[in-house]
Image (cartoon, grey):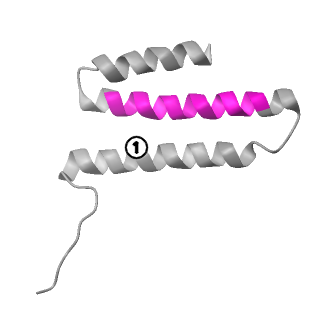
Amino acid sequence: MYSVSIFLYLYRILKGPTTSDKVVALDSIGMNLVAIVALLSMLLDTNAYLDVILLIALLAFIGTVSFAKFVEKGKVIERERDN
């Protein structure tokens, strides 16, 4: 079911009517990947994938925040130069 939902989110990214729909779909793909890796970790009865789960969640969060900042202000990194 998670794989099917990822493909539906990919469709939303390609055909999404607004930019915010695309951002929500990207964030949802990240959370589905976290769920898939967590299920794999439980099935294999190992803790080795917990770092991978944390990394995917962190990257998804940073991507969402930076894209929201880009949509709001038009740039991600603001540089102020003192001349």
Residue drawn 22% across the image and 71% down it: 79
**Residue placed under numbered mark 1 in the picture:** 64
Residue drawn 41% across the image and 27% down it: 25
Extent of the magenta region: 22-40
- Mark 1 surroundings: few (<14), some (14-19) or many (≥20) residues within 10 A: some
Measuring from the top left, give residue 65's x and y in whole percent.
38, 49
Q: Is residue 22 left or right of residue 82?
A: right
- Is 32 a magenta residue? yes
Q: Is residue 62 left or right of residue 55?
A: left
Measuring from the top left, give residue 52's x and y in whole percent.
67, 45
Magenta stretch: dominant SS?
helix
As drawn, which residue projects farthest toward the left?
83
Residue drawn 76% across the image and 29% down it: 40
Q: Is residue 22 left or right of residue 80?
A: right
**Residue type, numbered disc 1:** Thr
Count of numbered labels shown in the rendering: 1
Up/down of 55 relative to 40, above or below: below
- Is 75 a magenta residue? no
Up/down of 54 relative to 2, above or below: below
Mark 1 residue element:
helix
Measuring from the top left, give residue 19's x and y in whole percent.
26, 31
Image quarter where the C terminus lies is bottom left
Between 69 and 45, the one lying in front of the other is 45
